[in-house]
Structures are given as structure tokens and as C-alpha cells.
Image: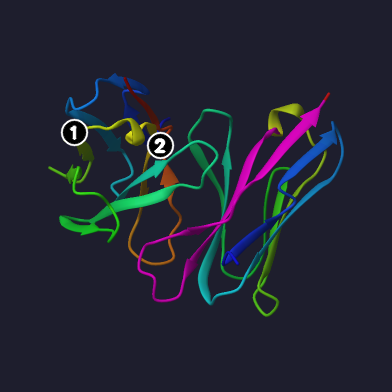
Amino acid sequence: DAMVIQNPRYQVTQFGKPVTLSCSQTLNHNVMYWYQQKSSQAPKLLFHYYDKDFNNEADTPDNFQSRRPNTSFCFLDIRSPGLGDAAMYLCATSRNRGAYEQYFGPGTRLTVT
Amino acid sequence: KNEVEQSPQNLTAQEGEFITINCSYSVGISALHWLQQHPGGGIVSLFMLSSGKKKHGRLIATINIQEKHSSLHITASHPRDSAVYICAVRKNNAGNMLTFGGGTRLMVKP
């Protein structure tokens, strides 16, 4: 059974049109992460939530925001997507902070036209 | 120099071969992860190691903390093992951030 679910799997949006990507988990994990992975590159951490505590990476553009309304759901909002934001967006969870295994979702591939 | 180096970058094997992928790192770590990513797909966590050795099915992962080195072995390889294998470390005092290696692209031919 899927433990980390991302919707949609493929998303096409227009340049400048806000878009929201969704992640849900059935693991009841405290930590949820959003990564951006561009073609042939390693994933790059954008931010993570520890419970309701939001932690933004220093180089994450302001264009990217996140919401976590409850333990199970976390959203990635891109306010004004640019062509450079086309990428695979990966959600992951871990039971807690520290050296815990991360469980990844299948990813959402975002295309910006 | 990257803090996490993987070798080889690309690997082609025949079905049934024993495969080894290596990961070396130059920083203190609290854990090392081996991840698998199929083309166009999401990431699957294979192992998380902080010492010793773990085995799951045909996959074996080892880590030598003193030498700052880990290996991922695949026994009796199969075409469905074709994927990118990524080594990622959690550095000491780095919070929740993983530092990723460049990945090893494996193709197993029938």
C-alpha cells in the first residue's frame, strides 16, 4: 500500500500561473520534506516541516511556499512558476528529525509552458 | 570536490552478474542512505546505515565508518534492477538535510 502519495503525478502549468502540488502520508510521521530534482541532478531540499514547525532552506526562492494543515498532508505552492521551475518535485517523510529513514513519494513532474 | 562521491557513474552489466556500487564521503556523518530511482520515477529508500551491514533480498549494503566508505551490492542482477542508485549522507549537525552523491546509472541487459 502506498505510504507517501503525491498528486498529481504530472502537472502542466503556464508561466506565472500559481500551482499547488499535494503530498499525503499514511505513516503518521512527524517530518515531511519537499525536494526539487531537475533533470540529471541530485534532489535539492526546499524545506521541511517538523510537526507544524516550518524550516526553509536558505537558498529556496521566495516563489516557493508550503503548508501543512495536519499531520497527513503537506502542500507545495509555487506562486509564479518560471520555466526554470520545471522539475520533479519529491515529497518525503521521516518518523522524526535526525538519523531516520526517509520515505519518498513517487514525485510530481511539473512542466511549465 | 564533492563531499559524497559515487563510482562508477555508469555501469552496464549482464543479467545474473554481481554488481558493486561504491560511495565515499569526506565528512562526519550520522547515517548513510542508499536510494533507487527508476527513469522518470520517484525515489525508493533501499537502506539506511550507520554501521555494519544490511541485507534485503538480493541487495546488500555495507559501511565502513573509519574508511568513510559504503558499498551497495546486487546479487543475481536482473533487468528490472536498471535504475539510478543514489548514495546520500546525513552530515553531523546538518539537521535534516541529506547530502547526495551524483548517482550511479545502472543498466542490466538480458
Task: Reply above or below: A12 against A33.
Answer: above
Scheme by which the image is coloured: rainbow
Task: Inspect this view and state whether residue B26 appears.
Answer: yes
What residue appears at the point 39 percent right and 61 percent down from the top-left corner? Answer: B97
Residue B30 is covered by the magenta coloring: no
**Where residue B28 appears, x then y in whole percent?**
53, 77
Task: Inspect this view and state whether residue B63 appears.
Answer: no
| Disc 2 element | loop
**Magenta segment main secondary structure:** strand
What residue appears at the point 82 percent right and 27 percent down from the top-left corner? Answer: B109
Residue B100 is covered by the magenta coloring: yes
Of all chains, the one bearing label 2 is A
Which residue is more in the foreground, B90 or A78? Answer: A78
**Residue highlighted by disc 2:** A105
Q: Earlier in the sequence, mark 2 or mark 1?
A: 1
Residue range (magenta): B82-109
Disc 1 marks which amino acid?
Answer: Ser
What residue appears at the point 55 percent right and 39 percent down from the top-left corner? Answer: A40
Could you tell me how far apart the alpha carbons at marks 2 and 1 are, in whole angstroms? 24 Å
Q: Kindly indicate the quadrant of the structure image that contains residue B82.
A: top right
Q: Which mark is residue A80?
A: 1
Relative side of A66 to B6, left or right = left
